[in-house]
Image (cartoon, grey):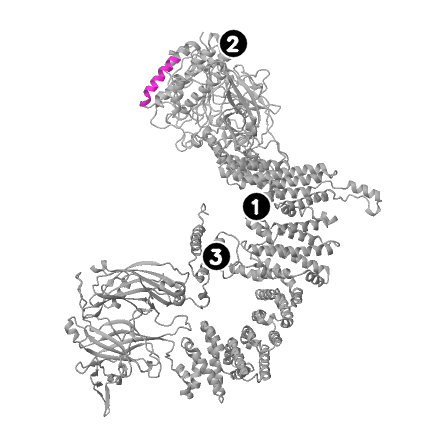
Amino acid sequence: MFLSEDERLSSLRKLAYDLAERRKQILSGALPVDEGRRIQREAVHELDEGNSLLGLDTIIRDDDGVAVNLDALTLPETFRLFKEAPARIISPPVRQNESQSYSMPCCFMVTIRKVEWKVGESAELIVSLYDEQKQTFITENCVLEWKRGSGFLHGEKVLFVDLKRFSDPSKIFLVCHVVRRGVMEWKENGTETKKPAAQIVRRPYGVSLVDVTEMIPQKGPLDDAEREVRLPITVCGDSDSLLATTRKAMAVRAPIADPRLLQSYIVLSAKLLVGSVKQVREEFPHLFVGNPPISRILGYPDVIVPSDVRNDIYITLDRAEFRYSGRNVEVSVSVCDDKGVVLPKTVCGGAGVELTDRHLSVVYYHMGAPVWNETLKVTVGFEQFATSHVRFLFKHRSSNETKDKAEKPFALAFLPLKSDDGTALQDRTYNMAVYRIDAKLFSEKSISPAYLQFNEFEDKIDLTTISNGQTKLAPPPSEGCYTYSAKESFSVSSLVCSTKLTQNVSLLGLLMWRSNEFALESNLKALPSQPGVQVVRYLRDILDVLFEILSDRKDSANVEAHVFEALVFLIDLATRGFPNFRPILDLYIKEDFCALLAYDKIISRLSSLINDVEMTNDSRIFFIKTVKSVEYVFKFIIQSRMLYAQMNQNQGEELFRDSMEHLLISLADFMGRDVRVFQTAQGSVLKYIPTIIPDLMRVLDPVVIASFFEQMIGNVPIGSMFQQQIDCILAVVQSPLFRLAECRQVLLPFFCEYLHDLEDSRRESSGASKVLMEMLVLLSDQTVGPSRFQDLTILIEKLLRKVVRSVIQLANKASEPVEDNFLIIMLSIFRQMTDIHYEQFIATFESDVDLVDFLQEIFISFKGSLFSKSVFPKEWSDMIMLQNTIMLQALTQFSRIIRIRFLEPFQQQLWNNFFQCAVEFCTQESLQLENFSENKQKRIRRRYDDMRLKMCFEVRAMWNSLGSHKRNFVPDLVASLLDMSLIPVEELRMAIIPIFFDMMQCEFRLTKSVHSTEPQQMTAGRRLQDEYWIIQGKFAAFETNMIKSLDVFIEGGRGDSDYAVLFEEIMKERCNNNSQMRELSLRFVDQLVKQMKLLLEYRDVMTSPDVDIESRMCCTVNLLEYYEGISKREMYIRYLYKLRDLHLHLGNFTEVAFTLEHHARLLIWTDDSLPTPLHCSDFPHDQTHRELKEHLFYEMIRYFDMGKSWEYVINRENGVFNELRTLYESDTYEYQKMSELLRSMAGFYDKVISPHETRVPCEYFRVAYYGGGFPVFWRNKAFVYRGKECDNIRDFTERVQNRFPGCVTLKTMDPPSKDILESDKMYLQIWKVEPVHQIDDRFGGKQVSHRIRNFYLCNDVHTFTYYRRLLSHGKDSDFANLWLERTTITTRSSLPGILRWSEVRESITGKVSPIQTAIETLQAKNDDIFRLVEKHLENPLAELDPQIGSILGGVLDPAVNGGISNYEKAFISPAYLDVHKTSEDRKEIDALKDLIANQIPLLQAALEIYDQKVKEPMRPFYNHIHDCYLKQKSHVEVHYGIRPPVFPKLAPKRSVAANRSYSNVEIRKAGSFVSYDNRVESGISSVSDSSATLSSTPRTGVTSKKSHSRVGGSLSASTLSLARSSRDSSSTLTLSLAPATPIELSQTLQYQRQPRRDAEKRHSRPGSGLLQPRRSSFAEEEPGAAAPSPPPLPVKRAPAEHFATPSTTTQNGGLLQNGFLTTPRRRLRTYDGGSGMNEDETPPEKPPLLPAKLPSPTPELPPKASAATTTKVIPATLEFDRASLGSPTTPRNSSRSSRSTSSTPPPPVPEKPAHLLRDGNASPLRDGIASPLLLKGAAPRDSGIDDAPT
């Protein structure tokens, strides 16, 4: 999880910390018992939650956290607990107090952390919650007092309770009002008075608020984290009230800019607590330390708790307006009786302060119309409520203390708490009448109650009178010191929150019915229309009144009917409207109910209601309400009867029973009425009547009750109310009635028959399953009586087959999971069935056909529902194991029945289904114990044992009992039994593996129908003889299925090496004992064992994350070779594409193409349908050979292109291009595809010769793996690897070492010792090898572009060489004794191929003499210099190659080996010449001299390049090596002769970039240079003779056909071919390197080409697929074209025989190329040693080159092209453009001066036509590559030119 950054990790970390903390608390022992149990439950819950996050097994626990014993539970009960487990794990453990509550209110705890303000006096902090949407406070005020000198309010808490979470969406604010208590005018001067002021005035200071909506979410999870916030205090302005400041702060949501604001703030924290205040007090007792004030909501909570007794009246001072003396008004509020006496301790400002006699309001300075919005709480006893009123005294407060003391109240208002109708004060706003007070007559000590005779409300006062018909203004009422003031106003609001006081007149009249019996009927009628929240508060009192009326009033039927309706209304209200009052109702019936005669009247009302035939709509509605409340109606009936019987010695028992039975019969008959009219009422009866069963059983016979339910359900009209009937049956089954045996005898057959018919109609399957589960739970209980066996028999006979079919039907539904309930029912039935049950059930089938159908259904349901699908989550381990135990028991019973009844006659399909079901059982994931932890394995084996073994033995018994019928299961059963046998249990494998040999025998001994006569006409002896000859004698079907199944299963993770060993042992033992099929079977067993080992290697490599991808490829190829050898094409192709995917992952695109070629070669160019084994998933729509092969070829082209291996597409014999071209040209004639193909091929040709396409040659390395630490497929083997681009030995070695950490790299090239080979460690041996190319064989010695040639230097090779220095007797620096050992290795396949490596197949070692080593070394150095010069000629404007300086320095000024001087001392010294006098020795010495002499012209050309491009800092170095060059040149020319320059002098850099190509500058092997064909065999080295031909004749006795010399691109002869690119022409001039004087390029080149022969003009397509380039003439230059001065170029006319001869085909089919005859051959890239693919296993050996007679001794040259006949020209940017190349007839011995001057002007060069230019380049081909212009110059050795000084 940590590595994958799993989200569960943080949760697991938190759980671990919590568990550690809880463990610490438990171990401390300091917790109370209840707290300790709670901590334990929480710890267990966290353990289960962690197990769930980790995917571990679910553990079923009880409420105390103890694991439940599942063996003591029934299967349905176990299933129910498992289904409930996830919800139990997700939700926290339920507290005990939560289980008793019906809803979860919230509490909000606020803690004052810090208060900072500039208040120098005492203050009050009033905290409350405000609803922004309703613009009102929703909680009462909580007042926190702060007295000066007592410190700040640190740690004070406020608890808001009974909050509504799910109220309307609105913003909730926590509002803090700061009220100062002190003098009227307080100045903030930073000083405080030392003594308190005598004047105490409550003055507003400021407001602070915060949005707490997110802390009290309306829905979703609760966040109980405590949050701390810092609230700035918004200070009130001089004319702002607290309410106005509050709304301003809410609108701005930011503190008001005030200087005092910076130092006034409140820091508080808030936390949400779940539950009521009682629950929170029990859960968090530490929060109530210090008795924090509790602030209740203004109103009733969502849930009214019956025990919540409340009697609060909230009075809000709204506003007032005074005309006289109305400044600085203070309101004094007090509660008085009817005599004006103040009631003590009846009023307070809110929670947190004690009740006082009076409350003083906030005073607003100089405000005549103050707005207080100040709420205070009034608490009055119920006895004093009716005579009490609230009195408001208004007083002016002065800032002068002396004057303030003399102030008296100037006005008064009062508010009675009781309304005129006797109810409590209504919740509304009142405009109070204000009465002015005469200060002279008023005394505060004794306030006169004379004001009580006035009207309290302003709207009740009428100041008009009517006199003589006229309306006049009457004087205001007055009495004593009180006078009404009409011009002044005062308003207050009231809110009554009381469970004793009612504001409803009708409810009050009902409760006091005896005082007004005339209004009783109307009050009863009005009761259902009253608000439920008001009625439910007086539930007990109303019930007492109703039953009192029912008992006392005997003369009025209407009153009884209204009482019954009121009773139904109260029951419905208490049970549904306010379900938390249901316990109150139960408690009332049990303890307070005492109406003895009520039962008779209730029964009478019920009977009349049910028997009302003509029910009106209102009657039906009331009937439905009555039925919904029927449970408590019958509770009242039964309780009333029980009380009456108890008081009257059980009198009237018979009459009561008869009335009850008649009532039930009427109810049953009611179910038969017209369903269209009474359906809703009938459905309600079915739903609610079962609730009366427990009460009915107290007074009636249970059998009578059972018969009633049978009759009632039976009377339901057919085809209606299925769901209601099922629900009713379920309730009856769950009731105590069904536990009685006598009741089950009545109900069970009826219920089973009903469910049977219900299943036939396919209705309400879920409800029926619940009923069956409840039945099975009850029948599994031992306490239900002995009849449970017979009851189970009834259930099995009637419903088992229906249940099985339901399981099958539900399992066939799409991809939905199988219905769990029916599975549990089926399993539970099988679990409770005994052997007798099985026998009795089987005996119920009338025929074997029905029994077979049932068994087939059983197997289908087992296989499809339990084994194939994941019915239960894998975490339900015990549930799954319990299921498998039941399945094993059932399958064992059914296997016995099959063997007894269905062997004869044989039911093959039934037997086959059993075998398949048994295999599915054994191979299901939940029974693979080896995949579990050790502890889990032990627990499962201890409780359930290994059920796979038991089933395996049952399968073996079934197989052995088949007898001659075994042949019917071969080969269909092979895969299934193989799957079972791969289970890693040895005992199981030993039981199943012998069955495979039985299958082989069965198929081997199958007979063929080849009788010529009827079998009955044969004699016994004749029949035996025929049977012997018609035995099949093979097991091909078994073999095919076995091989395919092994591949699928082992690759999928099944099987191991132990299985292969055990399989080989058991099978070979039985094969050896069978003489008839011993040889065939043993061979097949060996083949299977090999396949297993290869597959196991492949699986281990593919599944291990540490194994490198090369090892995966190797294992894949091993499997490929295996399947190729046994001709299993389907699996062969499957692994081909696995190999392709691995190559694609590494970007080996060339190897991908070769891999796809293997598939393509299996296809043919026909429209035959494609067989299944040859299908390709990448091309699913291809249906024929031709379609798929064509697609594969284009895929190969794409991947060859991506791998830059274009030659494999265009140049291969029988390659992709040739085959597609042949297909489109001569088979399908699809010229459009042919056109696209040719354009694609043209692009490939462009890419081959383009300088912009960079292809870095690959290096090759020999890698040997020694030691037992390597896998088997690498161990003690050597391979040749094809490196990546720019790979070197160091990087490659590091990469191989990283594949095998801990390996040791051997530092020597010596063969490993035996200890290394047998060691268990890993040893690597790596070095670089050189590929042996076949350039001459491929191109026949022709001159080709180095871009074409370089590809074949390192591709399509399978032979490699490397050298090792041998010990010499001389010094290490003695070149004369430097012997080398050359090893030539051959690989199994060419590289590149389907792998980037190939195993070494053959290795040949030989010695290389010192002089041969010197020749090869010097030849290699000359090649390096030549390539550098050639690179410059190709792109003269490129930067200087850094290698040229180091190479020139190493040759001209050697610091280590001494240069050519060492060669002279070693091989040209007199001592050496005296010893080596043979002709062969002389040839080698002459060759060495030639190489030394030929090095000088190359050094000259390289120095010219270096001189042109060297930077000034390196100029001294150039001067030094130039001096060395002059010395070496002088020495060499004196001793070995003068060699003419091989390259023209380089022209200076031009300002305009030239696009040219010297891509074909080569030195041919002819003339005075010696060509070496070093052939080695058995350590013998040879040097071929020098001749003027293009190849050398090998020495006698040399049989190796591979050339090991560096041929391609090397300076190995004295003939130079200089190729220049033109557009479509290629002109070659051979230059003889005789001691001739070079001429300047400013001279005109007089060159004439001979006409071509007809044979040369024909361009036939050679057999190799290579197209020969056309030869065209030079283009004439236009006159007058200016030309720069080019460097001199030596020119010598070459003999005609040295020109290249086009390829022709001889009569015998050989290919004539360059004067040699070769035999056409076909090369296919396949494996070595493979069979079964119908392809060439290895490419045929190339025959040696044979000299052939040319068609003409002197090939004719084509005629010279004139400017008038051609537009093909030499690019004008070449160095020797517009240059004279000299006369072809220049004499050999002409002087140097004759070459330096010329007066012939150069011929003009015409401009290139615009249509031939592309992107500004001279060549029309891609990337500017054009056909080469070859300049050849060399003279053969017999031309008379000396190659050494005389």
> Magenta residues: mostly which secondary structure?
helix
Q: Are marks 3 and 2 in contact (CB under 8 Å)?
A: no
Stretch of the chain drawn in magenta: 1512-1528
In this view of the protein, which residue sits in the foreground, 803 or 86? 86
Q: Secondary structure at mark 1?
A: loop
Disc 1 residue type? His
Q: Residues within 10 Å of mark 1 (few under 14, many from 20)?
A: few
Residue drawn at (40%, 33%), measured in percent from left and top? Answer: 1815
The vertical placement of 266 against 1073, above or below, is below
**Which label is found at residue 44?**
3
Measure the C-alpha gap from mark 1 to mark 3. 59 Å
Q: Secondary structure at mark 2?
A: loop
Q: Is residue 1515 magenta?
A: yes
The vertical placement of 1119 against 716, above or below, is above
Q: Are marks 1 and 3 in contact (CB under 8 Å)?
A: no
* Residue at the far front in the pictured view: 29
Tell me the quarter of the image containing the C terminus. top left
Disc 3 residue type? Val
Pointer 1 residue = 1181
Measure the C-alpha gap from mark 3 to mark 2. 99 Å
In this view of the protein, which residue sits in the foreground, 1720 or 278? 278
Residue drawn at (60%, 62%), measured in percent from left and top? Answer: 825
Q: Residues within 10 Å of mark 2 (few under 14, many from 20)?
A: some
Pointer 2 residue = 1476
Of mark 1 and mark 3, the one earlier in the sequence is 3
The vertical placement of 247 against 326, above or below, is above
Q: Residues within 10 Å of mark 3 (few under 14, many from 20)?
A: some
Disc 2 residue type? His
Asked if one can make out residue 1165 in the rendered structure from this viewpoint, the answer is no
